[in-house]
Amino acid sequence: MTRSNFAATCSALLLGLSLSNAHADWAQIEKEARGQTVYFNAWGGGEAINTYIAWAAKEVQARYGVKVQHVKINDAAEVVKRVQTEINAGRQTGGSVDLMWVNGENFRNLRQAGLLMGPWAESLPNWGLVDLNKPVRSDFSVPTNGYEAPWGTAQLTFIANQAVTPTPPRSPAEWLAFAKANPGRVSYPKPPDFHGTTFIKQLLLALTPTPAVLQKPVSAEAFASATPALWAYLDQLHGHLWRGGKTFVANAAAMHRMLADGELRLSLTFNPNEAANLIASHQLPPSAYSFGWPSGTIGNVHFLAIPANANAKAGAQVFANFLLSAEAQTRKADTSVWGDGTVLDVAKLPAGMQAVLRQKAPGALTEAVPTLAEPHASWVEALEAEWLKRYGSR
């Protein structure tokens, strides 16, 4: 046997041994998971999302004997505080949270405090289907390092009604001009609402003279140089908003209802397919449509994480792996179900699933909109604090 053949044979044996060990490890995880109850803390404000999670829970119960309890939350930051309180109180095991839907500053805070189990995400059997060209290993410029598994993709998208707004505003300058021409018919959710904060970040990315600093941890100097144009813009905009900018809408769902009623002319979402879903469920008229800005809009990946003191760590991994499967990702991306973007490499999937993932329903975002990277997670709290200081007490 030649040296090269010997090396190749050894490599093949080592690979086979590695794969065998991986399969054995996963089989053990599935065995441990059977009979466990996974308390999945995830946003509960969307009917389509809740229905999808209920379907996934039913499938995992039937296939793997894992019960999933959807704990419906309004703000992931509340879950972060709960996990931190439990661990600080000495509850190192048997925690109340087994799996959580998280990203951004909440992931950063959990990771910095050592509150997450990991690394585990890239050991999931379905990790091999993930599209590594998507930002699945970075969360708001913070490396994930296997401490959270990607679940879906998102991009800030705006919604209007063709019947009353045939030409939408596609830049901050046009947004301001539109608000002036339609007084009281434009608004956005009050930070720290996620959609409201995202809109503020979108404006900041478009208006700041120093966009590069946004990809680095925030500092007093960087904040002072990057944000004056944003505050000057908002000072002009707010007087033309709904209720004179003295009150802001509660959330994106309220904006959708107000758009349908004609009270607002514009709405926003972090799901390019949400308008299609709302049209299908008769919450928006068929004349509703989605649009973006030619300069691009913020996009990111949202993830699943397991707290360090989770009670059902094996069950949480089994559920996360199922949510990353081709079947679950394809169903989730279907606009008649949820319409959440996949994190999988579509080319690796069967033709039928590829067709579902590539179809666009009426109302969904069809135009090509560049995806802008999220600012570093540390900018969120700084922006929200300054926004509340300036405008929160109105």
Image: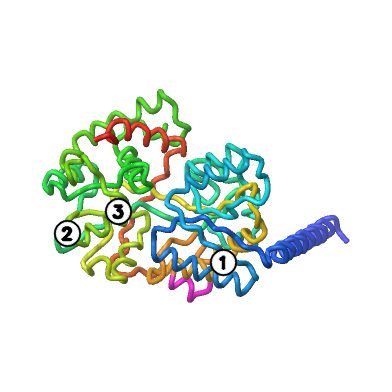
Tag 2 residue? 262
Point out the residue furthest to the right here. Answer: 1
Relative vertical location of residue 73 with respect to residue 366 in this rendering, above or below: above
Q: Nearer the viewer, residue 337 or 376?
A: 337
Give the residue type at disc 3. Answer: Leu
- The CA distance from mark 2 to mark 1 is 40 Å
Foreground mark, 3 or 1, reads: 3
Relative vertical location of residue 54 with respect to residue 127 in this rendering, above or below: below
- The CA distance from mark 3 to mark 1 is 29 Å
First-in-chain label (3 vs 1): 3
Q: Which residues are magenta?
A: 350-356
Instruction: State which quadrant residue 158 falls in.
Output: bottom left
From the top left corner, tell me how far across and down residue 381 is, in percent. 42, 36
Foreground mark, 2 or 3, reads: 2
Point out the residue furthest to the top here. Answer: 221
Query: Any magenta on residue 345?
Result: no
- Numbered badge on residue 275: none
Point out the residue furthest to the front here. Answer: 89
- Numbered badge on residue 325: 1
Give the residue type at disc 2. Answer: Gly
Relative vertical location of residue 81 with respect to residue 14 in this rendering, above or below: above
Instruction: State which quadrant residue 172 falls in.
Output: top left
For image coordinates 82% across by 58% down, the residue present is 10
First-in-chain label (2 vs 3): 2
Most common SS among magenta residues: helix
**Which quadrant: the N terminus?**
bottom right
Q: Residues within 10 Å of mark 1 (few under 14, many from 20)?
A: many
Q: Residues within 10 Å of mark 2 (few under 14, many from 20)?
A: few
- The CA distance from mark 2 to mark 3 is 15 Å
Give the residue type at disc 1. Answer: Ser
Tag 3 residue? 268
First-in-chain label (2 vs 1): 2
